[in-house]
Image (cartoon, rainbow, N blue to C red):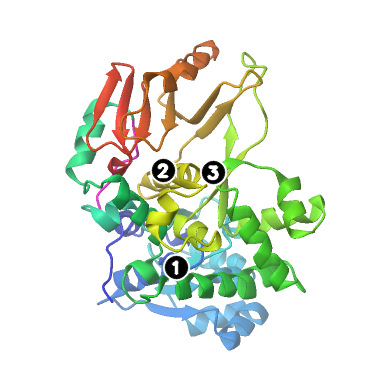
């Protein structure tokens, strides 16, 4: 098994020189503790995991004693299982704990952010780690937030490996989970099967005690069939045989544990005909391909979801470029009642950058016709792009590039 260097390592080292407490959040098994353990090598930092039931019980019943037994500098893994620790860590920080004293990780991101903001507001740095990025898997590992300007795009292509359409679907099918991509678990199907079972047994059962595990597994599959599409709660509920209200609650669990995320529709008071429904994406396309039973990249490339899963992959990769630089981002999609649609809209530096995502090596100029709708918005429209499967960076005109998806 090889360790894959993570882009976020540099930022963690920098932040640990300034903040006493660092909270690293993200989905299960994306390599949070592995990365921090790698950074711990050669230091006097110790590690304790709250997956250990005895340690968890102590942290919950006597957090002060727990912190005495595990003095700083320390890495506390799966900290969501003992929220009682947060107020006691606050006391340590307020009493002058040295920078880098507490590294915390957890896989229930929404819950952890609430706890940190409630107990450690202004005292902790919160960073996000997702699955491996294209840059980490196939490039230099160095990245900048994705931007649609020529200088940035030229810089990006120097640090990334080109990929044909076939190779892109191999990337999509295999996914980006470190356990599989590092070579530790070579059988992809067994890896993802174990991942789903572990996720339901630990995270879902913790958030919904008494859940019907087999039914919830069917629910995740039904959601995966609709990855990269506008959310239709009723259709998912009908597939599984549960009520719409139950489906909404279960989707909230998937979102809170970051198995899925949403793009909200862009709108403002000058664009009154916009649709309000979000689009749903999975954090990892390997998981989607496994759940939807595509047995090879070749079959996936020609299958019914080939366009939707390519869009899911592209949106997730753009999102990672911001997370890996510890940068905030504003991303939407656009659709209105006149059937104008834009797959993605990035709001950056006071401009809207429209993006269309297509499974094509030579996309048509007609694909950008909807971009002009944004001219009615109160925020000015900037440079846009078609993200596609062509080999090289090109352009339709000065206002719209054609960007290979391998360049993200």
Which residue shows up at 51% across the image and 68% down it? 92
- CA–CA distance between discs 2 and 3? 10 Å
Residue 88 visible in rendering:
no
- The residue lying toward the viewer, choosing from 310 and 364, is 364
> Residue 294, position in %: x, y?
48, 60
Q: Is residue 322 left or right of residue 256?
A: left
The residue beneath circle 2 is 314
Q: State which quadrant residue 356 falls in.
A: top left
Residue 78 to residue 405: above or below? below
- Disc with the residue nearer the chain's start (3 vs 1): 1
Quadrant for the C terminus, please. Answer: top left
Residue 139 to residue 273: above or below? below
Callout 2 secondary element:
helix
Quadrant for the N terminus, please. Answer: bottom left
Callout 3 secondary element:
loop
Magenta stretch: dominant SS?
A: loop
Q: State which quadrant residue 382 falls in.
A: top left
350 part of magenta stretch: no
Residue 87 visible in rendering:
yes
- Disc with the residue nearer the chain's start (2 vs 3): 3
> Residue 315, position in %: x, y?
45, 42
> Residue 224, position in %: x, y?
58, 54
- The residue lying toward the viewer, choosing from 183 and 254, is 183
Residue 131 to residue 265: above or below? below
Residue 319 to residue 116: above or below? above
> Which residues are the magenta region?
141-147
Callout 1 secondary element:
strand
Q: How crowded is mark 3: few (under 14 residues within 10 Å), some or many (20 or more)?
A: many
Which residue shows up at 43% across the image and 73% down it? 75
The residue beneath circle 1 is 102
- Give me the disc on residue 228: 3
């Amino acid at each position: 098994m090889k360790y894959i260097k993570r882009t976020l390592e540099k930022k963690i080292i920098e932040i640990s020189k300034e903040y006493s407490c660092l909270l690293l959040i993200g989905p299960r098994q994306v390599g949070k503790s592995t990365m921090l353990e790698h950074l711990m090598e050669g230091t006097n930092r110790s590690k304790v995991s709250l997956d250990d039931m005895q340690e968890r019980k102590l942290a919950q019943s006597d957090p002060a004693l727990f912190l005495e037994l595990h003095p700083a500098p320390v890495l506390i893994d799966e900290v969501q299982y003992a929220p009682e620790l947060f107020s006691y860590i606050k006391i340590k920080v307020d009493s002058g704990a040295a920078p880098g004293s507490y590294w915390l990780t957890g896989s229930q991101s929404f819950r952890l952010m609430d706890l940190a903001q409630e107990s450690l507001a202004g005292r902790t740095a919160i960073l996000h780690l997702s699955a491996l990025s294209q840059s980490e898997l196939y490039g230099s590992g160095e990245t900048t937030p994705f931007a649609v300007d020529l200088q940035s795009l030229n810089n990006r292509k120097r640090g990334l490996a080109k990929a044909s359409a076939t190779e892109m679907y191999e990337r999509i099918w295999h996914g980006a989970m470190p356990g599989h991509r590092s070579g530790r678990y070579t059988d992809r199907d067994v890896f993802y099967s174990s991942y789903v079972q572990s996720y339901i047994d630990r995270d879902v059962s913790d958030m919904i005690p008494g859940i019907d595990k087999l039914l919830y597994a069917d629910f995740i599959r039904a959601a995966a069939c609709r990855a990269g599409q506008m959310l239709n709660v009723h259709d998912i509920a009908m597939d599984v045989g549960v009520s719409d209200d139950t489906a909404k609650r279960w989707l909230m669990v998937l979102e809170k544990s970051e198995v899925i995320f949403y793009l909200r529709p862009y709108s403002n008071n000058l664009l009154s005909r916009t649709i309000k429904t979000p689009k749903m994406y999975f954090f990892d396309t390997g998981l989607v391909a496994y759940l939807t039973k595509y047995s090879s990249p070749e079959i996936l490339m020609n299958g019914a979801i080939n366009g939707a899963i390519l869009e899911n992959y592209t949106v997730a990769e753009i999102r990672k470029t911001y997370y890996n630089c510890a940068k905030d981002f504003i991303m939407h999609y656009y659709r209105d009642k006149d059937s104008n649609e834009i797959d993605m809209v990035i709001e950056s530096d006071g401009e809207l950058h429209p993006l269309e995502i297509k499974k094509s090596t030579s996309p048509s100029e007609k694909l950008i016709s909807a971009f002009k709708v944004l001219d009615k918005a109160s925020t000015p429209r900037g440079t846009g792009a078609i993200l596609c499967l062509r080999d090289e960076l090109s352009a339709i005109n000065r206002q719209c590039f054609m960007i290979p998806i391998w360049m993200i």
